[in-house]
Image (spheres, rainbow, N blue to C red):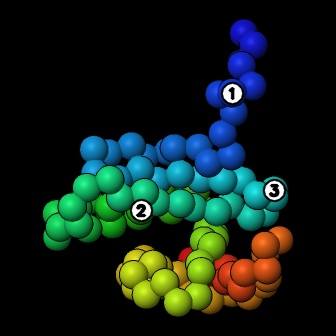
Amino acid sequence: MEVPESDHQLKVPVVRRPVYTLYLEQATPRHTFIHCDVHGVWTPRVKRDLCSDWQALRALHGGPFYALHEPGDRKHSKFLTMFGFRWAASFTDRRGNRMEIHTS
């Protein structure tokens, strides 16, 4: 079966829930980036469910995971800390923006 070019995604959804989606992106054979989109209201229940899915995904994948972070984004920084990420490196992207890579 031939897959149409338009169906190719760099970010592959691996956990789909009504309130959030977790994606993996294999940047290199040794570097897997994780992405999370929250589609609904953040509640204690959503946090518990996401933590549970995160633990299962980490166990299945084996890690480590990497996440891009734009310095100054306090909400994202809090989210990264909540899930055990720590700063690993800083760089300047192609557009001249300072970015960080965090790992867990």
The residues tagged by marks 3 and 1 sit, at their Cα atoms, a distance apart of: 23 Å
> Judging from the image, what secondary structure is the residue with disc 1 in?
helix
- Residue shown at 66% from the left, 53% from the top: 25
Tell me which amino acid carries mark 1. Answer: Ser
Q: Which comes sooner in the sequence, label 3 or label 1?
A: 1
Tell me: 49 left or right of 68. Answer: left
Q: Residues within 10 Å of mark 2 (few under 14, many from 20)?
A: some
Q: Which residue is mark 3?
A: 29
Q: Quadrant of residue 2?
A: top right
Q: Which comes sooner in the sequence, label 3 or label 2?
A: 3
- Residue shown at 25% from the left, 55% from the top: 40
> Judging from the image, what secondary structure is the residue with disc 3 in?
loop
Name the quadrant of the N terminus. Answer: top right
Q: Quadrant of residue 6?
A: top right
Please name whichever residue, 62 or 6, is drawn nearer the observer in this view of the structure.
Answer: 6
Residue 81 in view here: no
Residue 66 position (above or below residue 19): below
Q: Quadrant of residue 28?
A: bottom right
Please name whichever residue, 63 or 7, is drawn nearer the observer in this view of the structure.
Answer: 7
- Residue 29, percent from left and from top: 81, 56
Mark nearest the camera among 3 and 1 is 1
Residue 57 position (above or below residue 87): above
Q: Which residue is mark 1?
A: 6
Q: Which comes sooner in the sequence, label 2 or label 1?
A: 1
- Residue 100, percent from left and from top: 67, 83
> Judging from the image, what secondary structure is the residue with disc 2 in?
helix
The answer to whether the residues at label 2 and label 1 have Cβ atoms under 8 Å apart is no
The image's mark for residue 68 is none
Q: Residues within 10 Å of mark 3 (few under 14, many from 20)?
A: few
Q: Which residue is mark 2?
A: 54
